[in-house]
Image (cartoon, rainbow, N blue to C red):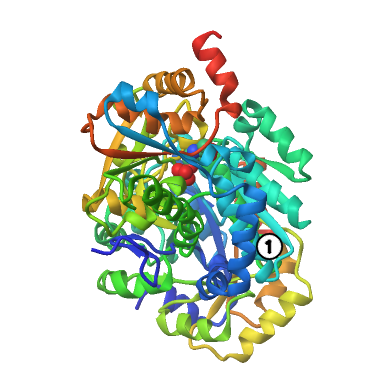
Amino acid sequence: MNYNADEKGYYGEFGGAFIPEMLYPNTEELRQNYIQIMEEPSFKKEFDQLLKDYVGRPTPLYHAKRLSEKYNTKIYLKREDLCHTGAHKVNNTIGQILMAKKLGKTRIIAETGAGQHGVATATVCALMGIQCVVYMGEIDIARQAPNVARMKMLGAEVRPALSGSRTLKDATNEAIRDWINNPVDTHYIIGSVVGPHPYPDMVARFQSVISKEIKSQLKEKEGTENPDYVVACVGGGSNAAGAFYHYLDNPNVGIIAVEAAGKGIDSGESAATSVLGKVGIIHGSKTLLMQTPDGQITEPYSISAGLDYPGVGPMHAHLYRSGRGEFVSITDDDAMKAGLLLSKLEGIIPAIESSHALALLEHKTFKPDDIVVINLSGRGDKDLDTYINYFKL
Amino acid sequence: MNRINQKLEEDKKILSIYFTAGYPKLNDTVKIIQDLEKNGVDLIEIGLPFSDPLADGPTIQKSSTAALKNGMHTELLFEQLKDIRKTVSIPLIIMGYFNPIFQYGVEAFCKRCQEIGIDGLILPDLPLDVYLKDYEAIFVKYGLVNVFLITPQTSDKRIKQIDNASNGFIYMVSSASTTGATTGFGEEQKTYFGRIAALNLNTPQIVGFGINNAETFDQATQTTAGAIIGSAFIKHITQFGIDTISDFIKTIR
Ligand SMILES: Cc1ncc(COP(=O)(O)O)c(C=O)c1O
């Protein structure tokens, strides 16, 4: 079984490019060039250099001893929370801004939910001196004020998405509409392994640096490149795609994707796409998505804004359907507890998205000699308000 | 012969009107169709509303959201249209995004369309290669015309592929934009219309996006078979209600 995208961007039955003809030239230009550009030595060199000097890579692979003791297994944390801007998102935006430059684009657009990807995009645009417009749902703008301010400080224009449910999926629609209206000079930096081909594959390749580093770091620490399990949270699925990437074809490495159950799978307020979703089309990709029986896309819910997406990248839909990946969903409450636990045991305050991955430890028992790598996709600074309100701190 | 192909053989410029089913009121669908026919419109595109209409500007987005809120859904639209052929003979097209049709089942959807007397479909996000591989045979089986879009950015090579795959008309999107842009037609459109005319395509073309009055209608139909009006019509019925359709049509021709 192949777990990577084929030439047309399909992962098994999922993926492809279900886009209006207006977007065909844009995505086609990217599709024809992205692999070739990524393989150019000059591109690789600049990408690697920026990841090292600007993002701060490689990020540590940290043996969490106290956490390991508590759960009686061997736990490593991949510290994406130590990336510049506070999450893995910047790996992708660095890659895509260099891609945009190679393609001669002079204007960048992006969508954002919580604002992490928007900040990571505004950051690389500032770095390169390129105009940046970030679409953000009107409701998210109101509840993520610090990130809106950060984007503005970085010189980006934040445009409210006023349509539909005025959250992430609508911000994505608005970014796509902007791209339709500006097909020549603009590059769309999508924030996860979602959207039409070649985005899922391109973003996964940029994020694959995560598992590349895990391999060599684990080799150094444990004498093997391969853990028994890699665990990551899945919103659209980019940090997970990066953490899984170099292990996809190795059946000895278990892959565990953690989705947000929100207030519970059956509560009507959830974002557990693999359980609640059906095959359909969202943002140009055939994948699993949450929808009405009539095919209208529904609004998901999670306490963590970064996991609050009604679909999942086509790679993950395929990992789920094929059985290669184990999918688990974690409630708001369990994630919040796991976030607090990591803070107390290891002195690391995780993003609430990442707390979902950590909460797996309460739900699955690992063997004492298992090596479990958990991708700590981001830090908790952005979530302090939510932690404060939840725990009445 | 399919009513769309028949209409295209007539010696006149086609005026096609798009409206969103279930808007302004849930049960306006049939009356709007009947009035459009009465007022000399040549072709009607019935919009099946979708929660996430990627290719649409604010006017059609809002009408879609409102229609869904009113309770419109696929089965209900078919229910509303089931006797439509007893009262109108105008060619009817359903325009919608692919996901609701995919959920209904493409074959089941096409079958219902044939039973009701729908003549064609416009599904902007069903791409050419997927259509040819998975769905062309079904469309043909149920006698449905499939309409593809082209834009000023579409290459000649791809336009020829689309021409070959088309069995009704080609939907010529007037500019790089979502629906409802009102900037008028300039040099870019002139060049584009000229380029398409020079390709001598087998399939007639009808222009859409940005047509909102007699002037833009005339400009759009100089070298093409007709033009489609959507957002401007929806704005009109939003403001003046559905009893004034004749007033709107008079402003076009
Ligand atoms: C820290 C963090 N983790 C995870 C995610 C979810 O995105 P993805 O599933 O693409 O990794 C986000 C998105 O904002 C995030 O900020």
Classify 10 Å Cα crowding around label 1: few (below 14), some (14-19), many (20 and above): many
Left or right of A211, for residue B207: right
Q: Quadrant of the N terminus of chain B?
A: bottom left
* Residue B244 seen: no
Between residues A163 and A98, which one lies in front from this camera angle? A98
Reply above or below: B15 against B169. above
Percent x, y of residue B217 = 68, 69
**Which residue is rendered at x = 64% and y = 45% of the image?**
A120
What is the count of numbered marks?
1
- Residue designated by label 1: A186
**Residue at the location (25% across, 61% down)?**
B107
Percent from the top left, x then y, of residue A377? 49, 39
- Quick check: A154 above or below B81? above
Residue A106 location in percent, x, y? 74, 64
Quarter of the image holding residue A139? top right
Question: Which residue is at 64% across, 40% downward?
Answer: A85
Taking the image as drawn, is residue A137 in sight?
A: yes
In the image, residue B235 sits, relative to residue B146, either above or below, namely above
Q: In this view, does A347 lie to the left or right of A155?
A: left
SS class, disc 1? strand
Q: Is residue B44 left or right of residue B222?
A: left
* Furthest residue in direction top, as rendered: A392
Of A342 and A248, which appears nearest the observer? A342
Quadrant position of residue B242:
top right
The residue marked by circle 1 belongs to what chain?
A: A
Residue A181's spot in the image, x, y percent?
Answer: 67, 61
Q: Does the residue labelled 1 lie within 8 Å of ligand 1?
A: no
Name the amino acid type tagged 1: Thr
Quarter holding the C terminus of chain B is: bottom right
